[in-house]
């Protein structure tokens, strides 16, 4: 039995996205990275990973990918990533592996280890993370956005596993938070003032954080560390592209 995969490739700006303009392409997902569209690198990695497939791509302009000669199915996007995931879950169900088109460093070994650890945790939703110490060790010059908890500081790795139907409830919560992103007080009420205060004071642990998500959604969430700091590097800005190009050249 294989694990279906979804690649999130939606872009609200299309050809006007700063990275699309930098690469002189019609869509950010097609940005040349090491001479290849970065989404092609992601699709190639999924194709090479044992037990993964079929692959779907969530993108607003299906025609943008017509030159890619790999097997995948296109799915529609919503107004934000949470909505796009919700649409994909309706079409594909669970379990479902999710990654993004701007993750050209993605490796089969990361996916295999992540899925194995997620299954062993018996969670409903697994989130791939890289600890700050791991990132500093492997890519000391990168600048990442970190989530600082009492017992760990980490950055996301754009790698998720929706293991069971209960994961849908987390997506619903995510959609709610995304809708309220310009109304911080409403977001605070949703998450709970106590949990936010503990976070601000540096007293919130990872155990308490995932327990709160479980309380709100009924789903068990697991943070799965990936032991390679490069897993936290995506391409969101020109400096990221320079770093990824350097890392690819070094590993060639």
Image (spheres, rainbow, N blue to C red):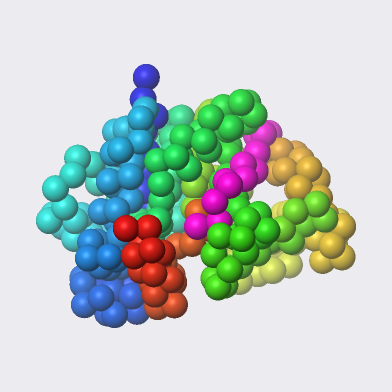
| Residue beneath the point at 84% across and 62% down | 202
Magenta-colored span: 218-230
Q: Nearer the viewer, residue 200 or 31?
A: 31
Q: Is residue 11 visible?
A: no
Using residue 101 as the reference point, say whether residue 226 is left or right of it: right
Position of 112 relative to 182 (above/below): above
Magenta stretch: includes residue 229: yes
Using residue 34 as the reference point, say whether residue 70 is left or right of it: left
Outermost top residue: 1
Residue 203, position as x, y percentages in the image: 87, 57
Position of 103 relative to 206 (above/below): below
| Residue beneath the point at 21% across and 72% down | 25
Using residue 108 as the reference point, say whether residue 22 is left or right of it: left
- Which image quarter: residue 220? top right
Position of 1 relative to 133 (above/below): above
Residue 136, position as x, y percentages in the image: 62, 64
| Residue beneath the point at 76% across and 47% down | 206
Q: Nearer the viewer, residue 148 or 15?
A: 148
Position of 116 relative to 33 (above/below): above
**Quadrant that contains the C terminus:** bottom left
| Residue beneath the point at 64% across and 29% down | 121
Using residue 63 as the reference point, say whether residue 180 is left or right of it: right
Residue 34, position as x, y percentages in the image: 27, 65
Magenta stretch: includes residue 249: no
């Amino acid at each position: 039995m294989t694990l279906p995969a979804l690649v999130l490739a939606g872009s609200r700006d299309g050809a006007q996205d700063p990275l699309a303009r930098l690469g002189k392409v019609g869509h950010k997902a097609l940005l040349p990275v090491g001479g290849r569209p970065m989404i092609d690198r992601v699709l190639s990695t999924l194709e090479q990973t044992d037990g993964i497939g079929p692959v779907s791509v969530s993108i607003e302009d299906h025609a943008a990918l017509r030159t890619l000669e790999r097997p995948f199915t296109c799915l529609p996007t919503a107004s934000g990533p949470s909505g796009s995931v919700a649409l994909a879950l309706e079409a594909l169900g669970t379990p479902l592996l999710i990654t993004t088109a701007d993750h050209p460093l993605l490796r089969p070994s990361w996916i295999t280890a992540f899925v194995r650890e997620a299954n062993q945790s018996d969670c409903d939703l697994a989130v791939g993370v890289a600890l700050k110490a791991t990132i500093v060790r492997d890519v000391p010059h990168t600048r990442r956005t970190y989530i600082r908890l009492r017992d760990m500081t980490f950055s996301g790795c754009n790698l998720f596993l929706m293991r069971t139907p209960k994961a849908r409830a987390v997506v619903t919560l995510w959609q709610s938070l995304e809708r309220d992103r310009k109304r911080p007080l409403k977001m605070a009420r949703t998450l709970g003032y106590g949990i936010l205060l503990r976070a601000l004071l540096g007293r919130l642990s990872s155990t308490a954080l995932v327990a709160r998500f479980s309380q709100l959604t009924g789903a068990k969430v697991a943070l799965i560390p990936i032991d390679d700091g490069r897993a936290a590097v995506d391409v969101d800005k020109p400096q990221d592209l320079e770093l990824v190009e350097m890392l690819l050249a070094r590993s060639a």
